[in-house]
Amino acid sequence: MKKNILYLAFAAIPFVFACNQSEKKADTAKADSVISETCYAAYYEKDSASMIVKKMASGKITGALLVKYAEKPQNNGTLEGKFSGDTLLVDYRFMTGTDSTRKYTNPLAFLKKDNKLVMGVGQIETTLGRSYFVKGKPINYEAGKFTFQEAPCK
């Protein structure tokens, strides 16, 4: 009889652990709520872009970016990253055109200047399927195509 109780006690441990983990996740989700949301729009020649930037209580940045090209299919996806000083560094996970089977991820950098976000251009490399800006190589914010200005959220 004692063996059965001992086995039952050991069998219950994973369930107790799982319940505690779900409670921790719920607490983390509550703690990381949206504290601000800003919408942006940018235009370059015949191309346009709109972006939503959500600042979380944890300091993390999430949001969305839609880029509409005049001559190519649009890119539509999500942003996730953080500010480092006046620079917003994010991973942009997006789909191109109507092909929902292929998703891409690229790093993006924005310089916050005069309540605008200036998209930078930098050298990117990919290692083990992950793309990132090359360390030691500067990001050029003057060569960027889009300068995002605050716009009403729709």
Image (tube, grey):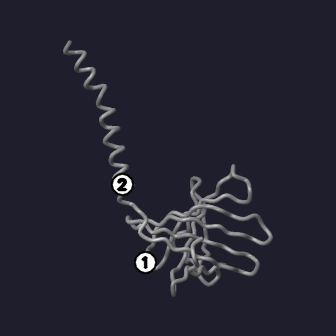
- The answer to whether 11 appears left or right of 46 in the picture is left
Q: Position of residue 137 (x, y in %)?
A: 55, 75
Residue drawn at (27%, 26%), measured in percent from left and top? 10
Classify 10 Å Cα crowding around label 2: few (below 14), some (14-19), many (20 and above). Answer: few
Residue furthest to the bottom in view is: 114
Q: Residues within 10 Å of mark 1 (few under 14, many from 20)?
A: few
User: Which residue is located at x 68 percent, y 64 percent?
Assistant: 75
Question: Image check: 125 left or right of 1?
Answer: right
Q: Nearer the viewer, mark 2 or mark 1?
A: 2
Q: Residue furthest top?
A: 1
| Residue 48: image location, x then y, percent | 70, 75
- Which quadrant is home to the C terminus? bottom right
Seen from this angle, which residue lies furthest front? 154
Q: Please name the residue that numbered disc 1 is placed on.
A: 85
Nearer the observer, 141 or 137: 141
Amino acid at dot 1 = Gly
Q: Residue at (19%, 15%) from the top-left corner? A: 2
Q: Secondary structure at mark 1?
A: loop
Query: Can you say which quadrant of the picture contains the N terminus?
Result: top left
Return the x and y of residue 95 as percentages of the image width and height: 67, 58
Q: For the image shown, how many numbered marks are present on the structure?
A: 2
Foreground residue among 41 and 120: 41
The Cα atoms of the two marked residues, 2 and 1, are separated by: 25 Å
Residue holding disc 2:
28
Relative placement, left or right, of 48 versus 150 is right
Residue occupying the point 55% across, 76% down: 110
Please report whichever mark, 2 or 1, sits nearer to the chain's N-terminal start: 2
